[in-house]
Amino acid sequence: MEFDVLVVGGGPAGLATAIRLKQASPDTSVCLVEKGSEVGAHTLSGAVLEPRALDELFPDWRDDPPALATPAGDDRFMYLTSTRAFKLPTPPAMNNHGNYVVSLGNVCRWLGAKAEALGVEIYPGFAASDLVIEEGVVKGVEAGVMGITREGEEGPDFQPGMELRATYTVFAEGCRGSLTKRLFEKYDLRKDCQPQTFGLGIKELWEIPKEKHTPGLVWHSTGWPLKSDTYGGSWLYMLGENLVSIGFVVGLDYPNPWLSPFDEFQRFKTHPEVRKFLEGGKRISYGARALNEGGAQSVPRLIFPGGMLVGDTAGFLNVPKIKGTHTAMKSGMVAADAIAEALKGETRPEVLETYPEAIRKSWVWEELHSVRNIRPGFSKYGFFGGMAAAALDTYVFRGKAPWTWVHHADNETLKPADKAERIVYPKPDGVLTFDRLSSVFLSNTNHEENQPAHLVLKEPERWKGVNWDQFRSPESRYCPAAVYEAVGPEAERELRGTPDAEATGEGAAVEAGDASVKLVINAQNCVHCKTCDIKDPSQNIDWRTPEGGGGPNYIGGM
């Protein structure tokens, strides 16, 4: 199938790209493919939406807003100790006056309907699994392959994929996109930028008693339960009638291999200041997702022959604001304008240099550049030094410091297990705190179990010597979905008494190790957070796109 423009990914950036294209050039043929079962099914965020880009795209959107959009109200920024909470001054970047507490999944569903009304062809459940490259130029993707068995053969329900071709292909895959990784390598797009650094966000949606609900409350915390050498914090947003979005982010440059972001989140909910919001309520959904935290210095080259990168796949998140939807959407709109202009000409350049030039002149770049030193300051100086550095950069230099600090790759930061403090987490109570498997159940995650494994060890023999011998299977702790299990007599001795081994006795799509200890990968549990692809010490775990429609199916409030 041939189109003028193909968009890969149905998140805010991809949808904004498609919409802006049809607004600028109604006769342009635009196709969008989304690996989730529907637009919004794989979209996970806090989220507080800064409407700046949405105002540009649809100035009258408030007349018909997305479901559950709630005007932001009271801002609270807290520092937690193990027993107490102290209210801190709200940093300017975290002032949410004029913003909206939203379900980002619902925002994407709303944008999807707008896109289809403009004539965009949207194909949900179509996972883009391969690039179509001819003579060095991206010509599109292969998508929609179904029914390949675990052995790599055509099963009884086999459906061949389709080549979706376009003059320009826009990649909007979100954080750590599987095809974007290949584009980085093919076109060396990261050669002139800092390494990307990431966080893992884990979220629950709760329904709480009406008398405890304050619509529009925006509550953030830092401090406990994390140590000062680990970047992270929480959010708690109240939206709709009685819904609470609560979550926790841990920077994936943490050094302790015994740390479990999932269990830190569960422990966070036991704090007296947090518990009071949730008691009497009910958890109704769960999810997890990695997010880019590198900022301006980690944005790669955005263009290559035949295509471009937009949104979080390029890393446009504003970390101090804890927001990226507005910048993601704007990047897609800027790309759309560049494409629309190119399609008017008789000759259509393969590489659209006008796109990165326009990004550099937009408010997206101004915003990201002004906060470029905030996140690396915490890596450089720890929590308290990072807070001081952030205050200096914000209030004294006002984002115009004459230096730019650097990042390091997250997979290089772990200490050996025998040199790190072992962490033993409390067992879940099933009321306020939970285990991984019951959490994955609430994400509505499902994969066709006979398909080829989408979580692959590039060199299975490497796992024991690195992951087990040096770090005692950190993937069994940083995965928020109980995908990875170290099993066997040696693992039983080492890990007994910790929540690492939530053994299912199933899966085994991939195994590595020997009789004393081996790794079992339960790929059917995967919620597509991509953390394993990021944090694995030797970059031995490769996350690949499963069949379309597989993975989580997040409900409306997520």
Image (cartoon, helix red, strand yellow):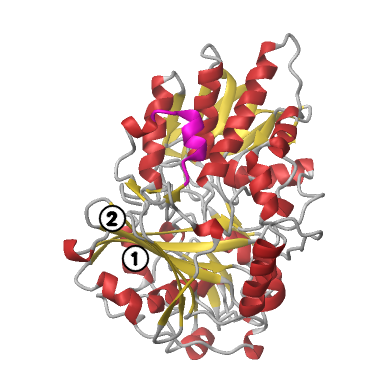
Q: Residue at x 59, y 77 (%)?
A: 514
Amino acid on which the number 1 mark rests in the picture:
Ser
Q: CA distance from mark 2 to mark 1?
A: 25 Å
Q: Is residue 124 above or below residue 255?
A: above
> x, y percentage for residue 92?
55, 58
Q: Is residue 132 above or below residue 438?
A: above
Instruction: Find residue 468 and report its image quarter.
Output: bottom right
Q: Which mark is residue 85?
A: none
Q: Could you classify mark 2 by the number of other residues whose Cα lies within 10 Å: few (under 14), some (14-19), or many (20 or more)?
A: many
Q: Residue at x 34, y 74 (%)?
A: 274
> x, y percentage for residue 331?
61, 37
Q: Can you see residue 433?
A: no
Element marked by disc 1? helix
In the rendered image, the quadrant that contains the N terminus is: top right
> x, y percentage for residue 174?
55, 46
Amino acid on which the number 2 mark rests in the picture:
Pro
Asked if the stretch drawn in magenta spans residue 55, the answer is: yes
Q: Is residue 122 above or below residue 476?
A: above
For this view, does 21 lie left or right of residue 65? Answer: right
- Which residue is nearer to you in this view: 65 or 122? 65
> x, y percentage for residue 461?
66, 70
Element marked by disc 2? loop
Magenta-highlighted residues: 50-60
Extreme residue in the front direction: 396
Q: Residue at x 82, y 49 (%)?
A: 192
Q: Which mark is residue 215?
A: 2
Q: Which mark is residue 439?
A: 1
Front label number (2 vs 1): 2
For this view, does 280 lie left or right of residue 501? Answer: left
